[in-house]
Amino acid sequence: MHNSKPRKNEFLLTLPSMGWLMIFFVIPTLLVIAMAFRNSDPYGGIGDQWTFNTIRDLRNPNYPSIIWRTLWLSVVSTIICIVTAIPASYFISRISKKFQDIILLLIIVPFWINFLIRIFAWKVFLHPEGLFKQILVTLHIAGPDTLLLYRPEAVLVVIVYSYLPFALLPIYAAAEKFDFHLMEAAYDLGANRFQAFLRVYIPGIKMGLLTAIIVVFIPALGSYVIPDIVGGPSSEMIGNKIAQRTFIDRNLPHASALSALLTFAVILPAAIALTRKFFKEKNSRSIGI
Amino acid sequence: MDDFLILDGISKSFGKHKVLDNISLTVKKGEIFSFLGPSGCGKTTLLRICAGFEEPDSGRVILNGVDITKLSPNKRQVNTVFQNYALFPNLSVFENIAFGLRVSGIKESQLNDEVGKFLELIQLTSHAHKKPDKLSGGQKQRVAIARALINKPNVLLLDEPLAALDLKLRQRMLVDLDNIHDEVGITFLYVTHDQSEAMSLSDNIAVINEGKVEQVGTPAQIYEAPRTSFVAAFIGDTNFFEGDVIEVDEPYSKLRVDGFTEVLAYNDKKIKKGDKVHISIRPEKFTLSIEKPDLSEKYNSIKGKVEEIIYLGYHTKYWVRVNEFLVETKRLHDRYMLDEKMITWGDEIWLSWHADYCYRLWQSLKAKLKKRRTSYK
């Protein structure tokens, strides 16, 4: 910048939002992390001593399987959402503007129904007495004793259902801006449909894909309501454990320790990716390419 | 040389709109062939049919003796330079050029050699690792050409490749394109709405209007002997007259043109006494003089009054009123200019032209002619 004054003004303009983030995001997060290093008092409050015991308590033998389940459910549901959203966005962005608007409206309409009610609807739908189950039994796809509800797969299906629109919208936004002449250019240069899709379309909607991955993976990682309602004790995720430690055990430091673990699980990969990108750019600049 | 690319009776409609109407053209191997026409005339659709992005409703595309009408774009030995370049924004210049070779799966070492050769051809070796958005318009254009040429196509299709460039750059790119064509010797199919681009680059031009071919010929044929009023008006400026044949004396005929005296015109077609004919005379074919010129009987001379003068540097345009006609004339400045009496507004002057410069048009659009009589252009 040639002049320091505009820069100072720009900084002033960001102050309100920075302040907001500081008060309602950064400080609470730091408080939660700090709380993980406190002991708990017997009355459900926070003790007055600094200790590593709370962190040590994370070595609970039940946790590894819960953490593993949380990870695979989040990863798999993110993959399913992205893989479904890519061809869907391609299709939507290729049809006429009028139908695009209709389809987008149909995607958004379910949001007008309360999230909890939609999840309960799934519970009814997958219930042993529910319609879906009856149809499967009549078609001899499932036996009368098969349980559709209260298993990790049910959680997976409902997470995908809940977050698919969040994957679809950013990918569609990127696809809509994508210059489809580039696909023609790829065909023209000898690429078949698959090659053109992989080498031209996917890189072309990269930013939309990144956004979609973030907005699906992070909320999925912190899922609490979905496994609580459609999953049983065998389908618990970290979110359920945090809630349980908070509301039932009244052990806030322990809940904080779990939350901190989750926060680091999200922030670490992002931090690594950012630093790598930073160094890559710095390198390519210093050798002048 | 043999006919290399043959378009045989191609028609194409989008909905009710007939874009191409029974177009037949032949392109020879190694030449630069242009589709020239105003926007919306169907020239780009014709190019897209050659590339394989559109399928004609009827007709065939034959390349090197093989019918490729139904072949998909990626299987055709034809590559395109797109109007907006369509460079892959996520790939470097090197990777853009390498794209065609990568999808064909050739060896890495061979690929490096090939791409290096083409980077040299377009003089962008030092920019190989830049992304397209770091390049200037002319550089992007050259990358697009190299990317299309590296697949060694039988025909290179160019869709208004210079339209996005400014005038100076366009002139330089024209020379570059011509040099590249000489270097690689590939047949070029060039789509443009710019007559000067088509004239300076092409071996042959097809003038297209409203989905039909108006005329095919060399640039000189198209300019000097336009067959239709559309071609005459689209390529350069011209004057149209309508006349009745009053006397035929091969190879010239005498016409009576309303408001003119008798006009002597060259007969390039069979003509009979009493026919109504349309003729075109280019502005630069007139000789302007203040005194009545002493010329042979093959010349026409007519008196008029200067109504409008536009000075354009290397030449001046004069609009001369001859009764109801406003005749557009052009005169180059030469060294005698300073000694001469200047022609100014309101001067009575003589227009003269050789009978050979009156071209009879095969067909004409009467409504358009009437309008042009009184309008400046």
Image: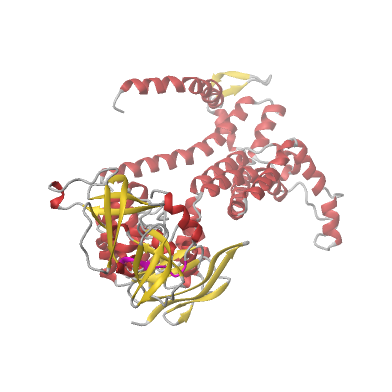
Answer left or right for A218 relative to A240.
Answer: left
Q: Which of B27 and A254 is in front in this view?
A: B27
Q: Residue at x 39, y 39 (%)?
A: A275
Q: Is residue B361 magenta?
A: yes
Q: In this view, does A163 lie above or below A242?
A: below
Query: Looking at the image, can residue B130 be seen?
Result: no
Quadrant placement of the N terminus of chain A? top left
Label tally: 0
Q: Which of A232 and A227 is in front in this view?
A: A227
Which stretch is magenta? B357-363
Q: In this view, does A189 lie above or below A121?
A: below
Q: Nearer the viewer, residue A29 or A10?
A: A10
Image quadrant where residue A124 sits: top right
Answer left or right for B145 relative to B295.
Answer: right
Q: Is residue B47 above or below residue A129?
A: below
Q: Which residue is drawn at 65% across and 33% down?
A: A242
Q: Is residue B325 above or below residue A214?
A: below
Answer left or right for B339 relative to B332.
Answer: left
Q: Which residue is drawn at 19% across and 51% down?
A: B333
Question: Which percent across, then down, holds residue B128?
Answer: 29, 55
Going by the picture, which residue comes out furthest to the top? A48
Q: Does the magenta stretch include residue B107?
A: no
Question: Which percent across, then down, holds residue A180?
Answer: 51, 55
Image quadrant where residue B65 sits: bottom left
Q: Which of B45 and A103 is in front in this view?
A: B45
Image quadrant where residue B205 sits: bottom left
